Image (spheres, rainbow, N blue to C red):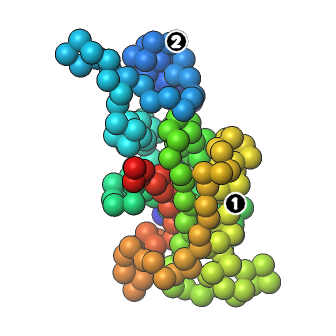
């Protein structure tokens, strides 16, 4: 399993200051307006999803999260895939301190655009049966719910935009027959839904 140190606040501060100078302020402010850029002398809006991917990839690279956090562009929108080793203790659904640091960074970007957000919990196929979690269904939905609740309550993501789903082991992205595959399947996906209008 890959573990990261605490988020490098100095690096993130440097990044936000640099971004602020690009977008016209000392600090990169959080708002729902997509920045604009000059193109052939005219101010045009940056594509929200391209903006989202660019900013998230910057956060991943600066904080060396590339082995635990990834970005996938698909038909539904942009999926922010976070492996469970960075979010939870094994067999638990409470967010770790590291998880909250990472989710705060992610929230600082996704709150800038108005798209709906879907939080999905996934497990591997190793069955859990405890008093708190009688099945993988219970574990996956609890992890998704705690992730969504943190984004709403602490990071002020609009609850009207958020939905929560638990898939248990039934939507794997890798082979559950290997430890490496199971590690990839234990994850929370935060999907920023693509507008269809």
Q: Is residue 137 above or below residue 21?
A: below
Q: Residue at x 39, y 53 (%)?
A: 196
CA neighbours of label 1 inside 10 A, class few (<14), some (14 to 19), many (20+) = some
The number of numbered badges drawn on the structure is: 2
Judge by depth and name the residue closer to the eye, 116 or 107: 116
Q: Secondary structure at mark 2?
A: loop
Residue 139, quarter of the rendered image: bottom right
Q: Secondary structure at mark 1?
A: helix
Q: Residue at x 67, y 41 (%)?
A: 155
Residue 68 position, x and y percent, is 45, 55
> According to the image, label 2 marks what residue?
26
Q: Tell me how far mark 2 sits from mark 1, CA to CA.
A: 33 Å
Query: Given the current orientation, which residue lies at the most extreme front position?
Result: 197
Judge by depth and name the residue closer to the eye, 56 or 43: 43
Mark sitting earlier along the chain (2/1): 2
Asked whether residue 142 appears in the rendered view, the answer is: yes
Asked whether residue 57 appears in the rendered view, the answer is: no
Q: Which mark is residue 92?
A: none
Q: Is residue 91 above or below residue 20?
A: below
Q: Decide: marks 2, 1 in contact (CB < 8 A)?
A: no
> According to the image, label 1 marks what residue?
146
Q: Residue at x 27, y 15 (%)?
A: 42
CA neighbours of label 2 inside 10 A, class few (<14), some (14 to 19), many (20+) = few
Residue 90, quarter of the rendered image: bottom right
Q: Is residue 11 above or below residue 196?
A: above
Residue 154 position, x and y percent, is 72, 43
Residue 136 position, x and y percent, is 62, 82
Residue 52, quarter of the rendered image: top left
Residue 41 placement, left or right of 170: left
């Amino acid at each position: 399993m890959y573990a990261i140190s605490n988020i490098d606040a100095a690096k993130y501060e440097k990044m936000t200051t640099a971004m602020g100078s690009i977008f016209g302020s000392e600090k990169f402010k959080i708002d729902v307006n997509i920045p604009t850029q000059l193109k052939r002398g005219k101010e045009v809006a940056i594509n929200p999803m391209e903006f989202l991917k660019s900013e998230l990839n910057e956060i991943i690279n600066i904080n060396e999260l590339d082995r635990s956090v990834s970005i996938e562009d698909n038909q539904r929108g942009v999926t922010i895939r976070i492996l469970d080793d960075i979010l939870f203790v094994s067999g638990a659904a409470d967010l770790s301190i590291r998880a909250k640091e990472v989710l705060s960074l992610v929230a600082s970007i996704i709150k800038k655009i108005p798209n709906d957000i879907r939080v999905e919990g996934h497990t591997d196929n190793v069955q859990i049966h405890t008093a708190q979690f009688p099945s993988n269904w219970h574990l996956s939905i609890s992890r998704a719910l705690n992730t969504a609740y943190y984004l709403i309550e602490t990071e002020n993501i609009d609850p009207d935009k958020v939905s929560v789903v638990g898939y248990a082991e039934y939507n794997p992205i890798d082979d559950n027959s290997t430890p490496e595959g199971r590690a990839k399947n234990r994850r929370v996906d935060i999907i920023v839904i693509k507008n269809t209008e």
